[in-house]
Image (cartoon, rainbow, N blue to C red):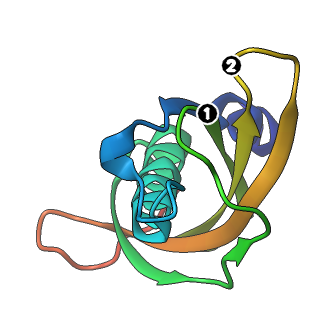
């Protein structure tokens, strides 16, 4: 399988509903909850790409362009952005969807860098 095929095959889509227990006092999704879900999506994408164990080493700028109200659907999309020897950068985009109508809009995006580790918790080649 080529690298391009592996990248396409590893693209990860996660869907969630914004329930009241994930919102703040403005009745919009907690930013920290979004970051947690984005990190999980990045981890899943990296794992699907190389089937190695990973740890998060950094996150790039996270852009929150619009709030996510309660009662919406969100889709998180993880895509491989860069591949190094032991590290991989995953771009994660978050889309808001209304449940009752055809509406989809990108509301958050950011990049996450993860490092592949072996059983000794030392970096290993993504290979």
In this view of the protein, can residue 83 be seen by the observer? no
Near-viewer residue (117 or 15): 15
Q: Earlier in the sequence, mark 1 or mark 2?
A: 1
Left-right relation of 56 to 89? left
Q: Determine the image quadrant of residue 112.
A: bottom right
Query: Residue 13's x, y, as percent?
Result: 61, 32
Query: Residue 87's x, y, as percent?
Result: 53, 73
In this view of the protein, can residue 28 be seen by the observer? yes
Query: Residue 68's x, y, as percent?
Result: 64, 52
The residue carrying pointer 2 sits among few (fewer than 14), some (14 to 19) or many (20 or more) residues within 10 Å by Cα, namely: few
Q: Residue at x 71, y 71 (%)?
A: 64
Marks 1 and 2, Cα distance to the nearest angstrom? 6 Å
Q: Residue at x 74, y 43 (%)?
A: 95
Residue 36 lies, with reference to residue 97, above or below; the image says below
Give the residue pinned by disc 2. 99
Q: Residue at x 53, y 41 (%)?
A: 70
Residue 111 lies, with reference to residue 16, above or below; the image says below
- Give the quarter of the figure containing the N terminus: top right
Near-viewer residue (26 or 101): 26
Asked if the residues shown at circle 1 and circle 2 are in contact, with their CB atoms under 8 angstroms apart, the answer is yes
Q: Name the secondary structure under disc 1.
A: loop
Query: Residue 12's x, y, as percent?
Result: 60, 35
Give the residue pinned by disc 1. 72
Left-right relation of 13 to 55? right
Q: Name the secondary structure under disc 2.
A: loop
Q: Determine the image quadrant of residue 119.
A: bottom left
């Amino acid at each position: 399988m080529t690298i391009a095929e592996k990248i396409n095959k590893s693209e990860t889509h996660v869907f969630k509903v914004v329930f009241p227990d994930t919102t703040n006092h403005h009745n919009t999704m907690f930013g920290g909850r979004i970051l947690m879900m984005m990190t999980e999506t990045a981890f899943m994408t990296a794992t699907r790409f190389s089937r190695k164990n990973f740890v998060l080493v950094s996150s790039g700028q996270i852009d929150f362009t619009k709030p996510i109200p309660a009662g919406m659907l969100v889709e998180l999309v993880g895509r491989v952005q860069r591949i190094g020897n032991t590290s991989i950068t995953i771009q994660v985009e978050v889309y808001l969807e209304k449940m009752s109508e055809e509406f989809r809009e990108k509301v958050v995006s950011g990049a996450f860098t993860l490092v592949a580790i072996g059983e000794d918790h030392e970096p290993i080649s993504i290979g």
